[in-house]
Image: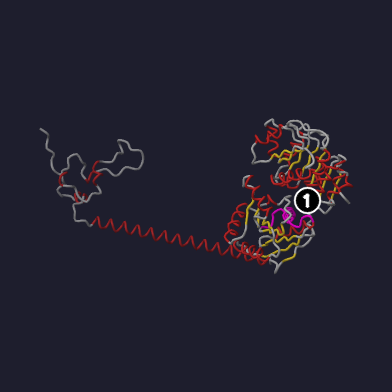
Amino acid sequence: MSFASLGLSEKVLSAVEAAGYNEPTAIQAGAIPPILERKDVLGIAQTGTGKTASFTLPMISLLEKGRARARMPRTLILEPTRELAAQVEENFKRYGVNHKLNVALLIGGVSFADQDRILERGADVLIATPGRLLDHVERGKLLMQGVEILVIDEADRMLDMGFIPDIERISKLIPFTRQTMLFSATMPKEIQGLADQFLHNPTRVEVAKASSTADTVTQRLVPAGFEDYEKRAVLRDQIKACDGLSNAIVFCNRKRDVATLFRSLIRHEFSVGALHGDMDQRSRMTMLDNFKKGNIEILIASDVAARGLDIPSVSHVFNYDLPINPEDYVHRIGRTGRAGREGTAISIVTGDDEKFLKAIEETIGKSIDWDGEPVDFEAAAEDKKARKKARGRGRDRDRSERAERSEKRGKERRSTKEKREAEASNSTEYDLADAAVPGAAQPEVQGFATPQNHAPAPRRGRRTRDNAPAEADLFKNAAHIPAFLLREARPRA
């Protein structure tokens, strides 16, 4: 089968031929004809099989007639991430080279003013993430009444990222008579419900079992210890042992692990870049561009790079962490082995990953081979309990030692205090307490109370006239009374 038999226009066929493609993939052959017939389409296919071209090519053909008006786009394509949206824009530029289509890209990290100027000229194709699209709608810069075609790409990722309420809101702004297309590599029950809600009597194009992996990808499991430094050592050994590694993506579950692993591989002199959702848009696009051009050999990324990115030269994918969602495993390893090429996916497994591994194997419908001895999950669980118990004993021992040191310091302080008090009591100087001996001559101190009748120290609290300290208290801790205070004051002349 050729592209010419699918009903595409001559201009589109010329662009496809210039891009170097001769035969359509299964998803393209199944989806393009019904799209050209203005039917709703539900497309399910493995990642890397050309889903993006299966809706961009017929859309370009349909848009040859008509013209967009200011702030009223003719078509709308919703993408879950900025990178996917930018990639779809590249597809329209490549295949629409013979057309004068205005393509608007609405994503975060870009100035609203720049996007407003593009919308004012009129957009034949609007590619957007849901959040930024609704921002423009709320600002009154975008009218959705002219949308003829709606495409929801990577629908399962939209579900994972919580975009479904936004999509429902957007669909109410678009005419009911629109043509709707929904594409995904996986089809959980929630997505089927979404398709029933948005699609009307759709043509279902399923070229492979949902959540299946490509046969061109060799999958392996590698055991590792619990500690992070052990996993990093295993990853370095696997990278060094790989033959024919051109570009590789290493996936982590957490952004902080991306940063930690990036610094570790830099220290070991690997050619490394990092990509995660907290980076600004310019840095993300620059990093991807350098990776595509081969300036960076290894890209460490979160799942922001797991969906839809088309980087043909990726030869290996490493799962530093097994994904919590088994569907993400399908998308991660789909970054390699694309368009019929061979690829390798290596996953590092620890004793904590038993339930994640079982979920992945159930999802893809087959077992994954081990490279070396498999992890004994029962023994690993017992070892983890023992280490946890040992850490608990260590913490108890540390607390006991700290308590002993604190008690020892308290004893030393009390001993020092008692010693100082004893030295003060043995002083040969005149002590106020000696003045209280019956029959002893008492010094007359003008203006001060004598030691034997001075009031006790007042209780703590706000000072009043009643509980103010007696004047003699000023000298109760003195070893003696200075002689000049005992002399009678002389009246002034």
Q: Within the image, what quadrant is residue 37 found in?
A: top right
Give 56 or 397, whichever is nearer the viewer: 56
Q: Within the image, what quadrant is residue 202 found in?
A: top right
Crowding at mark 1 (Cα within 10 Å: few <14, some 14-19, many 20+): many
Applied colour scheme: secondary structure
The single residue placed furthest to the bottom in the displayed view is 373
Image quadrant in which the C terminus is located: top left
Residue 238 can be seen in this image = yes
- In the rendered structure, the answer to whether residue 201 lies left or right of residue 116 reads right
At which x and y percent is residue 375? Answer: 69, 66
User: Residue at image x 66%, y 67%?
Assistant: 379
The range drawn in magenta is: 321-339
Give 318 or 112, whichever is nearer the viewer: 112
- In the rendered structure, the answer to whether residue 362 lies left or right of residue 110 reads right
At which x and y percent is residue 406? Answer: 42, 58
Residue 377 can be seen in this image = no
According to the picture, the residue beneath numbered tag 1 turns out to be 185
Q: Secondary structure at mark 1?
A: loop
Instruction: Check if residue 331 falls in the magenta segment.
Output: yes
Number of callouts: 1
Instruction: Check if residue 114 falls in the magenta segment.
Output: no
Amino acid type, label 1: Ala
At which x and y percent is residue 167? Answer: 74, 39
At which x and y percent is residue 363? Answer: 77, 56
The single residue placed furthest to the left in the displayed view is 493
